[in-house]
Amino acid sequence: MTNRIRQLPAQLVNQIAAGEVVERPASVAKELIENSLDAGADRIEIDVKQGGIKLLRVRDNGEGIAREDLALALCRHATSKISEVADLQSIATLGFRGEALPSIASVSRLELSSWHRDAGKAWCIRGDDGSVQVREPVPTSHPVGTTVQVQDLFYNTPARRKFLRTDKTEFSHLEQLVRRVALARCDVRFRLTHNGRLLFDLSPTTREGNGAGNRLRELVGTAFPEHALTLDQTAIGMRLHGWVANPGFSRSQSDLQFFYVNGRVVRDKLVAHAVRLAYQDVLHQGRHPAYVLYLELPPVLVDINVHPAKHEVRFREGRQVHDFISQALQRCLAEGSIQARKAPVEDLLPAIGMLDPGPVRSVPLRVAEGPDRHRFGFESQRPGSYQNADTRLPPLGYALAQLQGVYILAQTADGLVIVDMHAAHERIGYERLKQSWEEGAIRGQHLLVPVMVQVASWEADLAESNLELFRHLGVGLDRMGESSLVVREIPVLLQGADVEQLLRDLLSDFAIHGRSERIREEINRVLATLACYHHSVRANRQLDSEEMNALLRDLERTERADQCNHGRPTWIKLSMQELNRLFLRGR
């Protein structure tokens, strides 16, 4: 017999909602901290015990909650942030649904204390099991602002509690969450303690200049800022700013990727694809870029009401946002390619300390030949030399010598540059090939035997509606029946490719992103191979002074010159200070 439909009890409704909002202590911290920021707080203190399972207390100095609103704050869909449907079109706050507090209260022992800035005293209310209907606020001692204390998370839902990890693991998630939020709000002081131990106490600062750099170093370490390029670009009502690490500072995991949309931490596939596209020519396979980026755009152009925990967003003009992010990053990486790349001196010092201080042996170097071979200091200039007397040394300096037929040693204004000749020429050749190819567009070539591919009917519809776009990519195809496509033409450089797999991948890209860069990526792989095997300086080839300096100047003019197209560095730099450290000068 079919069960009758009935209304669920309020407590059960709240616990079901908690399953969407409250995954672990870090989820609770996220909701509470966002409430504090929405309340205008500029000081937030987070106290944690046993990874946040035993206790999680968030205290702020925001505007506070009035006595008559305390009980409402623990009721579902009660909020001060929206009041009508139109408000959903331009949400400017981090929270807005009014579900977090009642959901948390339904699976914990919650205490809410607050002093509204316009009230005469502070009040407190408890919400065990989400049951606050019969409870009245009681006077308490509390400064202006709000404190939410959450104890014994999931104590009344043991099935949920057993899925929690160790205290150490849960706190690791919570600490990472706080770090992410603190990077978004440099103007707010954040203080975090765990089991009575202070983890960090971040002073408020600005997001620009040295202040932002200090917070960056405190939260993600000192290495990232040293390898980061500053980005700030605006277009079509959007602004993207922050820091991106040069490709040489890639990671084995995507653990140093922070992206914010209007101050909100998000994980978005469109954004991830745009970043991956920008790094595709300069990152070694299997490596991940590092970045801290802030995207700002009118709230009406982004929908944040697509995920219960608000981790994901939906852009009204997704393709426009995608292209803006990708192109901004590409420009930044290209413009910042010739910068001081530091060698890992810290890794070299221990090895030097272990060397046997025996007789010093001279190591023969092939000194650059030519009319300027003895002018290492470049104090004097003469007509015909690479540099005029009234100009500075170029970024990569001038060649001094060639080492083992592989590396060029060059003197700069403040140190020594070491260039991998093959990697450098490979990048130069690759960029020239790409430019030549793009100027000639993507040319197709007819297949001797057309390839029939069986697809789903919706994929055939997708292909039929994008025939012109496929032709632009050098792919000529026709629809043959309800669920068949025939490929008649593919790009010239992709002759011999798996045509069926190529088509399926293109359809997948169109379905997910509304576009595809796969053809261009495949062609770039072919061009990279050509650059590697046909247009590069081979190892052990001896170059004269003029050839070496010409290679340095070409490298300076080349986009994304820091890495070859396989992701290897093309050059590194040792400053005079670092060289002095290596030789223990000044000690």
Image: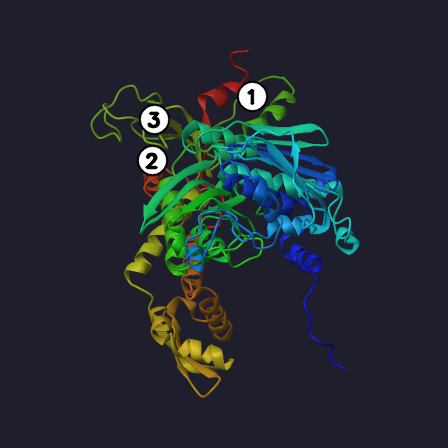
Quadrant including the C terminus: top right
Disc 2 or 1, which lies upstream in sequence? 1
Which residue is nearer to you in this view: 460 or 536?
460
Q: Residue at x 44, y 44 (%)?
A: 294
In this view of the protein, can residue 574 be seen by the observer? yes
Whether pointer 2 and pointer 1 mark residues with C-beta atoms closer than 8 Å, the reply is no
Disc 1 or 3, which lies upstream in sequence? 1
Mark nearest the camera among 2 and 1 is 2
Q: Residues within 10 Å of mark 1 (few under 14, many from 20)?
A: few
Which residue is nearer to you in this view: 178 or 286?
178
Mark nearest the camera among 2 and 3 is 2
x, y percent for residue 100: 60, 50
Q: In the current view of this chain or complex, which residue is farthest to the bottom?
A: 481
Q: Which residue is mark 3?
A: 373
Q: Which residue is mark 1?
A: 361
Which residue is nearer to you in this view: 350 or 87?
87
- Amino acid type at circle 3 is Arg
- Amino acid type at circle 1 is Arg
Q: Residues within 10 Å of mark 3 (few under 14, many from 20)?
A: few
Looking at the image, residue 370 lies above or below residue 561: above
- Colour scheme in use: rainbow
Whether pointer 2 and pointer 3 mark residues with C-beta atoms closer than 8 Å, the reply is no
Q: Which residue is mark 2?
A: 549
Label 2 – label 1 distance at C-alpha = 29 Å
Looking at the image, residue 187 lies above or below residue 587: below
